[in-house]
Image (cartoon, rainbow, N blue to C red):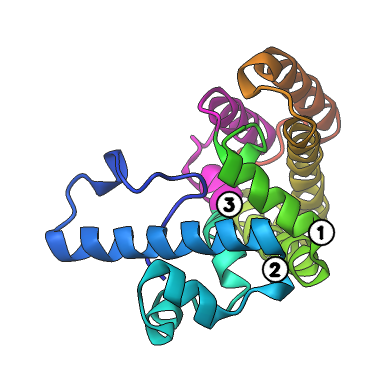
Amino acid sequence: MTGIAIGTDGAGADDAGMGLRERKKRQTAIRIWQTAIALFAERGFDEVSVAEIAAAAEVSKMTVFNYFASKEDLVLGPMEQHIGEPARVVREAAPDVPAVAALHAHYVAALAAFDPATGLNDQQQVIDVVRLIHRTPVLALRAYAGFDAGARAALTTELLARDPEHDPLTARVAAAQLLGTQLTLTEENQRRMMAGDRAADVLPEALADADRAFALAGQGLGDYGTTRS
């Protein structure tokens, strides 16, 4: 699937360096996604067919499936591009940086950028996606079970690679704790956005909550994830 980000307007830095063909493909994917989210928000996920989405986006049904493998992917595909992000953050961290510190710094930076992946984004399309997931069992199951399993497996692998003792149990527990910390923070931010709060108003509290939550995680994990000799 052509990479798109939740909340994108179809232009910006992500287009830089792309050839005309790739840029047009990305813009088509964004148009299809935006059309689908608008229809789902208006009528409900189960009440909208892929054929209706294709017609509204002025593409063929086959074109929709060329970009999104399933109807569920129209909602969850952009989010699932972040499955490997925690693992990447740990993998790219300096050898002396603990996993909790690396993920804390990354999450705080994402909050400050109002990254939809943190839940702290009040764009209407982002809120529509969150509501759809909460209200649609098939989407909720895939979002919370599938996403969590994939992210934990990837992060566990990276933590094992940085663990001099190569202890699988410790890596699995640490991955679950770190992802649980992020998920708890993100769910609270999403709750505030769905309640109508402005992201800019919530940011100071969200940053303070992130500092407190990762500090709690750090009390248990300490310098775990550093490549100590």
Where residue 118 sits: x, y (%)? 64, 37
Label 1 – label 2 distance at C-alpha: 9 Å
Q: Which residue is mark 2?
A: 45
Callout 3: helix, strand or loop? Answer: helix
Q: Quick one: label 3, few (<14), some, or many (20+) residues within 10 Å?
A: many
Whether 32 is drawn above or below 218: the answer is below
Q: Residue at x 55, y 50 (%)?
A: 85
Quarter occupied by residue 55: bottom left
Q: Residue at x 65, y 55 (%)?
A: 155
Q: Which residue is mark 3?
A: 87
> Foreground residue, 219 or 152?
152
Whether 139 is drawn above or below 221: the answer is below
| Residue 146 within the segment the image draws in magenta | no
Q: Nearer the viewer, mark 3 or mark 1?
A: 1
Q: Amino acid at mark 1?
A: Arg
Q: Is residue 65 left or right of residue 200?
A: left
Callout 1: helix, strand or loop? Answer: helix
